[in-house]
Amino acid sequence: MEYKSDFLIIGSGIAGLAFALKVAKFGSVVLITKKEAMDTNTNRAQGGIASVFGKDDSFGLHIRDTFASGDGLCNRDVVEMVVKDGPDRIRELLEFGVKFNIGDSDRSKKDEQNFDLGREGGHSQNRIVHAHDMTGREVESVLLDQVKNNEKITLLENHVAIDLIIFSTRIKKGPVISTRDDYCCGAYVLDNETGRVKTFSSKITLLATGGAGKVYLYTSNPDIATGDGIAMGFRAGATVANLEFVQFHPTCLYHPEAKNFLISEAVRGEGGRLVDCAGRSFMEDYDPQKELACRDVVARAIDSELKKSGDDYVLLDISHKDADFVKTRFPNLYERCLTYGIDMTTEPIPVVPAAHYMCGGVVADLSGRTDIGRLYAVGEAACTGLHGANRLASNSLLEALVYSDKASKQAVKDLGTIDFNTVPDLPLWDETGTTPSDEGITVSQNWDEIRQFMWNYVGIVRSDKRLARASRRIELIRKEIHEYYWDFKITSNLIELRNIATVAELIIKCAMQRKESRGLHYNIEYPKRNDEEWLKDSVLKRPYTA
């Protein structure tokens, strides 16, 4: 059966929801999400949204901080657009009903100038607009309520996108034409509740699938973060870039029962100190900004300390601050740590780095358009040029808001030029010759192996030898997955395995290209930045269907 809509949105984080609400005024919208709608990276974002509201702050300072964090690779036009558009997008969230923290000076005043602005690593001013330590959850819940109450939007949970449907490869017979003349017609999607594969036809398709943290053994991301949009976009022929720049958040809770639990950077912003297990402060040995250095610096510092000491973790200590302040500023963190037997008001928190954010992705222009017609990408699945080689803290939700706004305006313009009659009925999913899988162990074994060698060989610190080992392993595994994929009926686990294998290969290829150390990519054989040869993006384009 074929489902038709003006807009097909894949992903229910802040980018997908905000886009849906804006384009719903102009056409029918189908929004699919692979699990429950709240199961997103947005929902786990603790810190906040970086935007200029402080009396001592300025767009120029925010732009400067973004460039400093991006280590030379940020696109100036993009940075200026996103930073300058930020305040308007925050005001828009206020109109939707999002409740941000108000400063202590006068909590009865709800105007924007009285935001309680926090500071995080890499920022020269307090500019983090937040809702306690649960900003993502607040924004996600408010936008999701709006989406659920909009009769023009059909929200389908437990629907897993398999592949994009591209005119040249799925409809037209003959050789693949260039993506300049090609366009996206929709997607094949697995209904995880019925096991049926549905065909979704759309005039405009948006990739808003989030990140790829599950490519790594240790991650702050939810289980759904398997790089689906990046993998689907690449298979469809879209250009991807800068996938070697994987941000490892310095401080995830180290506890045998804790899974993917992030300790917000805002803890360091409020005076939290990093110490080793002997109680020695060490960040001053690595950067003058100490705990408020950029994430790549802090993550490498912790990695270095752990390698020297042989310990499994370092400690993040904010117990010197007033207990009532800690409980009020970090209510969610305080309660969650208590469930693991840790009272952060009286003792330090054991932490380790973990894969957190993908700075690269499907290349998108200033309006969120990819180089495949009618296909847009926003949020963590996209590479816009904002983050460069290292994302500045709390610029992620900001980027998603700004780009969903820009993309929605361009998509509405494009919509008026498209007629469904220009696209014939799409072919339905073909399961001919496939059988139910009886080798689930193959999926789980390959999944575990990819995540393990990506952590060991393509992690915080890399080398040519480690990358070569990873490249050999992923080539063999991808061949196994390719054979398995076409022999058995599709499942959500198989879709995700195929995607993390594709993204792992892309990360490795980008990392092998870059013969220098810059931002989040650190290779011990090229320890210095090389602007003469590598002041450029790492670009991959491979028009094939795998």
Image (cartoon, helix red, strand yellow):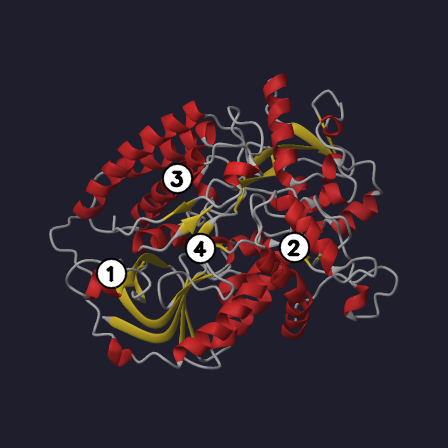
- Nearer the camera: disc 4 or disc 1: 1
Picture residue at 31% right of the left edge, 52% below the top: 235
State if disc 3 and disc 4 touch (CB < 8 Å).
Answer: no
Please give the label number shown on residue 229: none
Name the amino acid type tagged 3: Ala
- Nearer the camera: disc 4 or disc 2: 4
State the image quarter where residue 369 is shown: bottom left
- Nearer the camera: disc 1 or disc 3: 1
Residue nearest the viewer, comparing 178 with 374: 178
| Secondary element at image label 4 | strand
Q: Which residue is mark 4?
A: 363
Q: CA distance from mark 4 to mark 1?
A: 19 Å
Name the amino acid type tagged 2: Met
Crowd tier of the residue under label 1, counting other residues whose Cα lies within 10 Å: few below 14, some 14–19, many 20 or above: few
Q: Which residue is mark 3?
A: 504
Q: Which residue is mark 2?
A: 134
Q: Which residue is mark 1?
A: 177
| Secondary element at image label 3 | helix
Horizontal side of residue 223 vs 340, given as left or right: left
Q: Residue 169: x and y, percent?
A: 22, 60
Among numbered discs 4 and 3, the one appearing first in the sequence: 4
Q: CA distance from mark 2 to mark 1?
A: 46 Å
Q: Residue 460: x and y, percent?
A: 54, 32
Residue nearest the viewer, comparing 338 with 420: 420
Picture residue at 42% right of the left edge, 36% below the top: 513
